[in-house]
Image: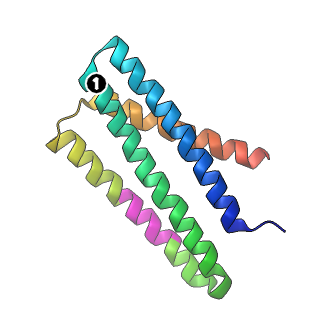
Amino acid sequence: MKNPTSEVAKNSKRLLVNQIVVGLLIAAFFELKVGHWQALSALYGMFVTIAISTLLSRGVQRAENEAIKNPKSSMGILYFGAVQRFITAAVLFIIGLGLIEFEPLPLIIGFGVTQFAYVLNIIKLKKN
């Protein structure tokens, strides 16, 4: 029998690598076609996705460990994690767009494409 926590950890590492590779490709595209600041904006978008993906994987690991003891509190951990990720993303977008003044389009593209890499990873996992 496979250890679910180790499976989540393994898949999380694979996802993180995939998101970084995709994010770096997007940033390289902006660097070559538009400019340095747009590339940094795209990298920041990638950073937002990686931050919330990391929070998700840690939350799922905590919930799996807690489910053994108390399934109801496990659901609470997952709900809290959703709120935590939403607030984290909002705060990071406010910082990136409002305080640092990154370019909006490259930032959103960097975020969106790396989020899409997350979705593709989930689809791939479901097929296996």
Dominant secondary-structure state across the stretch colored magenta: helix
Q: Residue furthest right?
A: 1
Left or right of 125, for residue 84: left
Give the residue displayed 39% in from the left and 64% down from the top.
84
> How many tags in the picture?
1
Image quarter for residue 15? Answer: top right
Say if 109 sits above or below 92 in the image: above
Q: Nearer the viewer, residue 24 or 56?
A: 24
Check the image and report above or below for 78 versus 74.
above
Q: Which quadrant: the N terminus?
A: bottom right
74 displayed left or right of 10: left
Instruction: Give left or right: position of 73 versus 97.
Output: right
Query: Is 79 one of the magenta-colored residues?
Result: yes
Residue 76 vertical placement versus 29 (above, below): below
In the displayed structure, 19 sits above or below 50; it is above
Image quadrant in which you'd find residue 127: top right
Crowd tier of the residue under label 1, counting other residues whose Cα lies within 10 Å: few below 14, some 14–19, many 20 or above:
many
- Element on which disc 1 rests: helix
Give me the residue at 44% from left, 36% from top.
Answer: 112
Q: Which residues are magenta?
A: 78-86
Residue 114: % across, % down: 48, 37
x, y percentage for residue 79? 48, 70
Q: Where residue 102 appears, x then y in whole percent?
A: 22, 33
Q: Position of residue 82 (x, y in %)?
A: 45, 63
Residue visible at 34% across and 19% down in the picture: 31
Pick out the residue farthest to the left: 99
Residue at 62 percent of width and 87 percent of height:
70
The three-letter amino acid code for the residue at tag 1 is: Gln
Residue furthest bottom as drawn: 69
Q: Which residue is mark 1?
A: 38
- Residue 47 sits in quarter: top left
